[in-house]
């Protein structure tokens, strides 16, 4: 039994070995509470019996930042680094930063994580990933004897509206804007090539092989650090790819062909398009294609007079550029393009991503077929009831 000393601390002895003549070798440990005393016993045993180094406890913030810089940051792209820093600084550190690692309990982590129910799947995944990696690393280094994040349960994320292919009417509206709107070429590149937004904005005229009617995707425009676009590397090695140019797009681009080093969608001085300018052009295209809705906002009349007219303020787009990418994947599926070929055209680094899209589309076809069968058999039943 541990004995409480006059200074209020608990003290106990542990046997760490024996001398040559069989006498026990003991060490005394102490702690302010029984729990702290038990942790001191475990630390002493690890040091004297197991040969482990006696590692001192650390503040969560101190250790998490050191973990990120040494074990995570060197292996991330710049956009991913920004994402990790954002979740560390704005989510995890404010909650646990000033706590000692050993003081953080499993139920505390779970209660905090439960507060993210209804948030996006990405947000939930990121905060769970950071917590698990930090505590797993602390256990591996001997700071913790147990991992408090081991049994964390994932809260339910928000239900996200699934991206879909365009309807026949929407395709007609988009094609109308492609050939008649002053910014229609942006629609055309997304619609006929299925590229990511940053890949489309990073295209230069020299990327096009007019003889073989293909285009090479070589760069990305990144807005991670603000509205000013920065030329960046592609998302992955698989994103560097050659895509065949459909005839409609080929004819449109040939008529506007320019110098090889110039951006298709560049700003003054051949710099990348700013995010603000892109947003305005996108909203103008959305309105032209009938895919935007007017937004009613309450605003101070004085502030309204000062504000310059901005189409982004009064309208909301119904879709994002990524819908064009899903529509392109659907077109590949409907054309019978092999999933492995589709994977290369879409620039996926993981076949599972392409397979998931194809499986989803296949399930939709089966569902449509089931509905059609119901109608057919319903007609047959009605026919049976009709008089001869």
Image: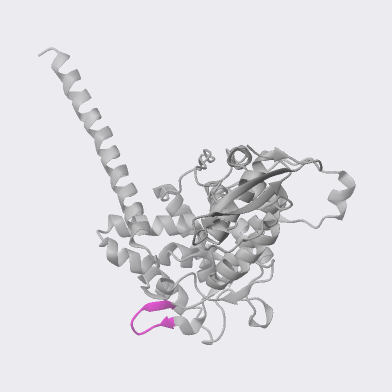
Indicate the quadrant where residue 338 lies.
bottom left
Q: Residue 320: in sight, yes or no? A: no
Q: Is residue 18 magenta?
A: no
Q: Position of residue 179 (x, y in %)?
A: 49, 65
The range drawn in magenta is: 208-216
Q: Position of residue 198 (x, y in %)?
A: 54, 68
Q: Position of residue 372 (x, y in %)?
A: 25, 34
Quadrant of the rendering where the N terminus is positioned: top right
Please tell me which residue is depicted at 47% across the width and 54% down the height of the picture: 323
- Is 20 displayed left or right of 167 in the figure? right
Q: Residue furthest front?
A: 21
Q: Observer-nearest residue: 78 or 328?
A: 78
Q: Observer-nearest residue: 158 or 127?
A: 127
Quadrant of the rendering where the C terminus is positioned: top left
Please tell me which residue is depicted at 47% across the width and 78% down the height of the picture: 218
Q: Observer-nearest residue: 120 or 36?
A: 36
Q: Residue 89: in sight, yes or no? A: yes
Please tell me which residue is depicted at 50% across the width and 46% down the height of the picture: 150
Tally of numbered discs: 0
- Is 101 displayed left or right of 258 in the figure? right
- Is 284 displayed left or right of 197 in the figure? right
């Amino acid at each position: 039994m541990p004995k409480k000393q006059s200074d209020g601390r608990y003290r106990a002895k542990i046997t760490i070995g024996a001398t040559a003549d069989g006498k026990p070798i003991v060490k005394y440990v102490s702690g302010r509470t029984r729990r702290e005393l038990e942790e001191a016993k475990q630390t002493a045993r690890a040091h004297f019996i197991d040969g482990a180094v006696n590692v001192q406890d650390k503040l969560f913030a101190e250790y998490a930042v050191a973990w990120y810089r040494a074990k995570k940051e060197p292996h991330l792209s710049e956009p991913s680094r920004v994402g990790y820093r954002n979740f560390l600084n704005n989510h995890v550190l404010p909650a646990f930063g000033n706590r000692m690692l050993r003081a953080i309990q499993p139920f505390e982590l779970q209660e905090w994580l439960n507060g993210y129910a209804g948030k996006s799947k990405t947000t939930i995944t990121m905060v769970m990933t950071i917590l698990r990696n930090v505590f797993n690393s602390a256990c591996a280094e001997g700071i913790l004897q147990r991992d408090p994040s081991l049994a964390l349960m994932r809260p339910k994320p928000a239900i996200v509206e699934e991206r879909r292919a365009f309807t026949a009417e929407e395709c007609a509206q988009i094609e109308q804007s492609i050939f008649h709107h002053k910014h229609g070429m942006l629609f055309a590149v997304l619609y006929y090539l299925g590229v990511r937004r940053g890949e489309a904005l990073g295209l230069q005229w020299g990327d096009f092989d007019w003889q073989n009617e293909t285009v090479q995707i070589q760069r990305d425009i990144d807005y991670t650090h603000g509205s000013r676009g920065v030329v960046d590397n592609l998302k992955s090695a698989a994103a560097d790819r050659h895509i065949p140019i459909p005839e409609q797009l080929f004819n449109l681009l040939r008529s506007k062909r320019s110098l090889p080093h110039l951006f298709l969608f560049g700003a003054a001085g051949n710099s990348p398009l700013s995010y603000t300018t892109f947003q305005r052009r996108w909203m103008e295209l959305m309105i032209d294609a009938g895919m935007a809705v007017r937004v009613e906002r309450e605003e101070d009349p004085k502030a309204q007079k000062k504000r310059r007219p901005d189409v982004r303020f009064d309208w909301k787009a119904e879709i994002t550029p990524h819908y064009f990418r899903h529509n392109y994947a659907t077109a590949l599926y409907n054309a019978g393009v092999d999933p492995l070929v589709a994977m290369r055209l879409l620039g996926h680094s993981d076949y599972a991503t392409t397979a998931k899209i194809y499986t989803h589309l296949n399930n939709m076809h089966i569902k449509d077929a089931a509905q059609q069968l119901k109608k057919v058999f319903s007609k047959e039943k009605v026919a049976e009831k009709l008089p001869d």
